[in-house]
Image (cartoon, grey):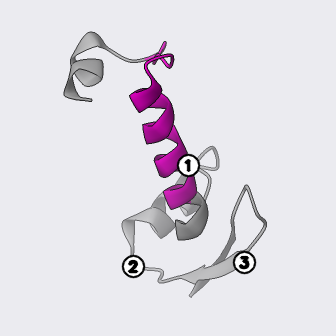
Amino acid sequence: MMRVQCVICDKIEELNDDTLQAKRLRNRPIHTHMCDECHERITERTNERLASGSFRFYRSSRRIEDDF
């Protein structure tokens, strides 16, 4: 088991060593871990901003924006 810490709320969790996320964290230090609660909260708030109409993605391709 691999112990990881959420970059937002500092919650410590354990990941199974065989998962893809654990492998990414071991091999590429630039990758960070975010707990499920923080990930869901950010997803909900991002969708709210998208629905408001005053939010734009600046670093994405046009195809990705059209999917939203």
Residue at left offset 73%, top offset 56%: 8
User: What predominant SS class does the magenta segment belong to?
Assistant: helix
Quadrant in the picture for residue 11: bottom right
Magenta extent: 39-59
Q: Mark 3 points at which residue?
A: 12
CA neighbours of label 1 inside 10 A, class few (<14), some (14 to 19), many (20+) = few
**Name of the residue lying farthest toward the right:** 10
As measured in the structure, the alpha-carbon distance from the residue carrying label 1 to the one carrying label 2 is: 26 Å
Q: Which residue is drawn at 47% across and 83% down?
A: 16
Mark nearest the camera among 2 and 3 is 3
Any part of residue 55 in sight: yes
Q: Which mark is residue 42?
A: 1
Q: Work out whether residue 14 or residue 68 is closer to the camera in this orientation and state it.
A: 68
Q: Are marks 1 and 2 in contact (CB under 8 Å)?
A: no
Residue 3 percent location from the top left of the image: 66, 79
Q: Name the residue under label 2.
A: 18
Q: In this view, does 44 lie above or below 26?
A: above
